[in-house]
């Protein structure tokens, strides 16, 4: 037991068996060694560069599988990012592009704000980023400027102002000027120029995120009582 190298054992196991997330060793003297392992969960999927299936990544960006044909529910598909020389059990490597930097910022902020139900990240254009929420709402974020504030108020609007079954586009790109807008899917599909709801709130991040359980803050919805002009 004195000669056991814990770090080397963990490294070998996690690299040989990709779905092992971490390894903990416990010594019970005089001659027993207990190994405890935790399982990694797939969080993201990238399209393989050869166009054959997907690459599955854990939340820590460890490569769990390659050449996956079908994605299970709950895995977020990432578009606009290419994994360089994917190797099972290793941390995914990417070109240090603006898209990669946006990806790091996005997943960090989504994790920090405990966002769930995010099913798609579009990183193709770093100044026109978007995410898909619950397979029904496309949230346009623009660049990563004020990303935390955009995501905070997007969630506020989702929880308080947009019907839970409604589909459409939530545009958060003008948050710096204190405005967001929502266009229902029916208008997009039919090509209608119908009413686009507008929401107004402080242009600076002066207020923390308020969940739907706290009614002390609300956004102004334009609708029939719009204070602004045409969207």
Image: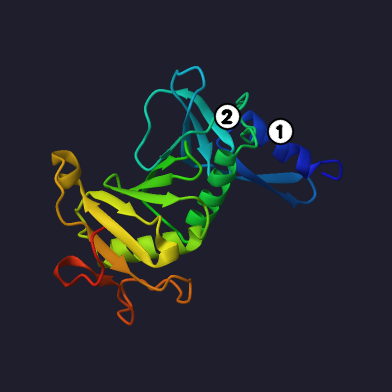
- Tell which of 55 and 27 is nearer to you: 55
Residue at screen point 34% across, 66% down: 156
> In which quadrant of the rendered view does residue 178 lie?
bottom left
Indicate left or right for 33 with 57 as reference: right
- Residue at the bottom extreme of this rendering: 216
Q: Earlier in the sequence, mark 1 or mark 2?
A: 1
> In which quadrant of the rendered view does residue 89 lie?
top right
Which numbered marker is on residue 12?
A: 1
> Is 124 situated above or below 33?
above
Q: Position of residue 187 (x, y in %)?
A: 16, 46
Indicate left or right for 15 with 210 as reference: right
Indicate left or right for 19 with 34 as reference: left
Residue at screen point 38% across, 57% down: 172
> Is 116 situated above or below 126?
below
Q: Position of residue 48 (x, y in %)?
A: 49, 23
Could you say whether the residue bearing mark 2 is in a helix, strand or loop? loop
Q: Residues within 10 Å of mark 2 (few under 14, many from 20)?
A: some
Indicate left or right for 94 with 68 as reference: right
Could you say whether the residue bearing mark 1 is in a helix, strand or loop? helix
Instruction: For the C terminus, give its image quadrant.
Output: bottom left
State the CA–CA distance, disc 1 to disc 2: 22 Å
Q: Position of residue 151 (x, y in %)?
A: 43, 59
Q: Position of residue 84 (x, y in %)?
A: 62, 27
> Is 181 situated above or below 69?
below
Q: Residues within 10 Å of mark 1 (few under 14, many from 20)?
A: few
* Residue at image mark 2: 83
């Amino acid at each position: 037991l004195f000669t056991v190298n814990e770090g080397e054992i963990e490294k070998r196991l996690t690299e040989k068996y990709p779905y092992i997330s971490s390894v903990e060793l416990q010594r019970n003297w005089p001659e027993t060694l207990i190994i405890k392992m935790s399982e990694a969960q797939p969080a993201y999927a990238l399209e393989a560069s050869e166009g054959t299936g997907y690459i599955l990544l854990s939340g820590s960006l460890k490569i769990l599988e390659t050449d996956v044909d079908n994605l299970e529910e709950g895995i977020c598909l990432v578009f606009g990012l290419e994994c360089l020389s994917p190797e099972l059990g290793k941390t995914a490597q990417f070109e240090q592009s603006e898209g990669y930097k946006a990806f790091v910022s996005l997943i960090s902020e989504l994790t920090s704000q405990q966002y769930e139900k995010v099913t798609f990240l579009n990183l193709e254009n770093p100044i026109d980023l978007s995410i898909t929420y619950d397979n029904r709402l496309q949230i346009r974020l623009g660049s990563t400027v004020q990303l935390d504030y955009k995501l905070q108020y997007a969630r506020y609007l989702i929880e308080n102002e947009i019907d839970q079954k409604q589909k459409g586009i939530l545009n958060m790109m003008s948050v710096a000027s204190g405005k967001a807008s929502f266009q229902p899917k029916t208008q997009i599909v039919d090509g209608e120029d119908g009413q686009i709801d507008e929401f107004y709130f402080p242009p600076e991040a002066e207020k923390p995120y308020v969940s739907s359980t706290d009614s002390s803050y609300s956004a102004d919805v334009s609708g029939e009582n719009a204070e602004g002009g045409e969207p």
